[in-house]
Image: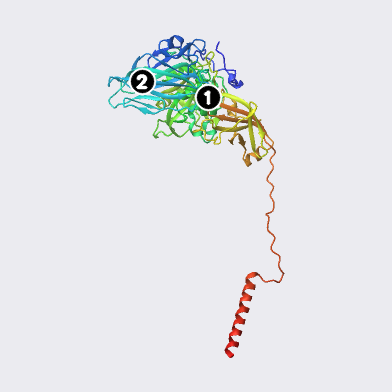
Amino acid sequence: MKHRLLSVLLCAALLAAISPGVFAENDPPGDVLQDNFFRVTSAEGWHQGTLEHLIVVDDVGDGALRLFPGETEGTYLSPEMTVPAFEYLVASWSADTPEGTWVEIRARAYVDQKEQWSGWFSWGKSGIRIKRGSIDRSDGLVQMDTDTFTVLGSSGETASQVQIEAVLHSDDPTASPCLRSLSGTMKNTLDGQAIPIYQPHGGEELPEKVLLAAPAYSQMARDPAIGDSICSPTSLCVMLNQRGLDLCPEEVALQEYDFSYGFGNWSFTVAYAGAFGFDGYCHYADLDFVRQELAHGRSVALSVRYSTNPNGANPYLENGAISNTNGHLISIVGYETVDGVEYFYSNDSAASDDVSCALRRYRADQLDAAWSSRIAYVVSSEPEENAGLAAPQRIDGTLEPTGEAGKYRLIAEGAPVELEPSFAAKTNLLGAGTIFLVEDGASAPAMPDPVPVTAANLPREYLSGSGGLITLNSSLQQSLSGKSGTVWIIRNDGITYRAPLTVEEYQPPVESDPVTEPAATQPADAPSFPVIYVVLAGAALILAIVFLLAKKKR
């Protein structure tokens, strides 16, 4: 029986059952090389490749790779795989990366028209506690653009062989990352060359309606410094919390962030699910695949672009959460047919508040047109056995008043915690992040059934911090005077601190009269200095005239 992480609290609200008729949860099968998808995940599958300084362990999931004891770097090299001719390839992986470790996935492809193998291209170093970053590069045959490996050319160039390499690294020979799965999905947009979609549950008769108990979060109601950019991690947050976690969108956003690109790296986003022990991957899919996942109790996320204007530049989506978007991720939580028209339900994070995000009904044909990329995020129902042991941490702490109004020092594990001096520089400085306060007794908005209310739905006030000090500005000091709450300090290196806080009674600053220097004393009838100067000068002039007249008379 697969276990859940002890470090993750299960929201009571998320225990609500999914709608009747949904199939029993059944995660996708193991090793795959079929249609537009391949995956290595079992001990037997790993042994089919070439291993250098790595060992295969069979007590993690259904098989995983670790560094050979004492080694600090090792590589896995897959066989050269023959696949349908493709233009685009997206890789994804599930791994545990303790502090000081990372994994890096690389690929090369055989370009048929050039009769030549490309160079090796990397998806960048990936880990929870490192400065993650994708790498854009081209060699004339193929190009790596953040998360997508693309065959170049204007004459129908494609590749029909691919080889994958994984590098596992540790700064400490006593610690090792653990790679549990490695996947790839392919797409061909050339006329007549579409690749069949891998359907792990194809042929099953689906229920007429599915509506999952998945939470809804507005990215726009989160940290205003990043809110308009975090659709991808917010959609994954919906998926993970629907599976029993209790994360905040800001945690997912900051801890999957690609320091070279931003929050929308498809591969890095699903790798975050892997950090909690889940098997996550990207898939170039279709609506049949989405229906199957929903029928098995698993919400999915889709990369879309749309406009609510029928004459807009992007595909029309009449009930879209935002008027226009050139690129956006949405979570899909159900489907049904009403009056002969099929709809999908989305908790679309682009709406202005959590309630407005929930259960937006999108026509299937319009959603299909808006889903131009065809990428879907797929996450297993439960964590794998013995996986997720290096998941992002939540650490309890305390906040001590410094004696200066509105300033508190963070203490955790018996010692002061020094925050980065530029803590708000969350998108360029490892260890930076965001801080907010959730007031005790705060109430979350009522959600439509069956959308659960989670801790992440509670309203919050954003604070500032630097050098270990948490700061409430004067307006917050006044509005929260004497009240209690919990402060969340979320860092982009996989650590979140939570500390209770009772705000000190607000004391308005004492206003004192301005200090004036006493005037110099002088006789009340004494003329001012300039007057005396004029009088003396006049007297001297008179004396001079009298003297000259007297002299003239002589």
Secondary structure beneath label 1 = helix
Q: Residues within 10 Å of mark 2 (few under 14, many from 20)?
A: many
Q: Tell me what residue is drawn at x 62 percent, y 28 percent.
A: 498
Q: Residues within 10 Å of mark 1 (few under 14, many from 20)?
A: many
Taking the view exactly as shown, the residue that stands out farthest to the top is 44
Residue under numbered circle 2: 108
Of 221 and 91, which appears nearest the observer? Answer: 91
Res. 38 image quadrant: top left
Of 255 and 177, which appears nearest the observer? Answer: 177
Cα separation, mark 1 vs mark 2, equals 34 Å
Residue 140 can be seen, yes or no: yes
State which tag comes first along the sequence, 1 or 2.
2
Which dot marks residue 238?
Answer: 1
Give the amino acid type for the residue marked by disc 1 in the picture: Val
Q: Measured from the top left, where is residue 238 in percent x and y?
A: 52, 24
Left or right of residue 245: residue 484: right
Q: Tell me what residue is drawn at x 60 percent, y 84 percent.
A: 547
Which dot marks residue 459?
Answer: none
Res. 47 image quadrant: top left
Residue 347 can be seen, yes or no: no
Left or right of residue 339: residue 248: right
Left or right of residue 330: residue 544: right
Quarter of the rendering occupied by the C terminus:
bottom right
Q: Measured from the top left, where is residue 484 in percent x and y?
A: 67, 32
Q: Measured from the top left, where is residue 495 in percent x and y?
A: 56, 26
Secondary structure beneath label 2 = strand
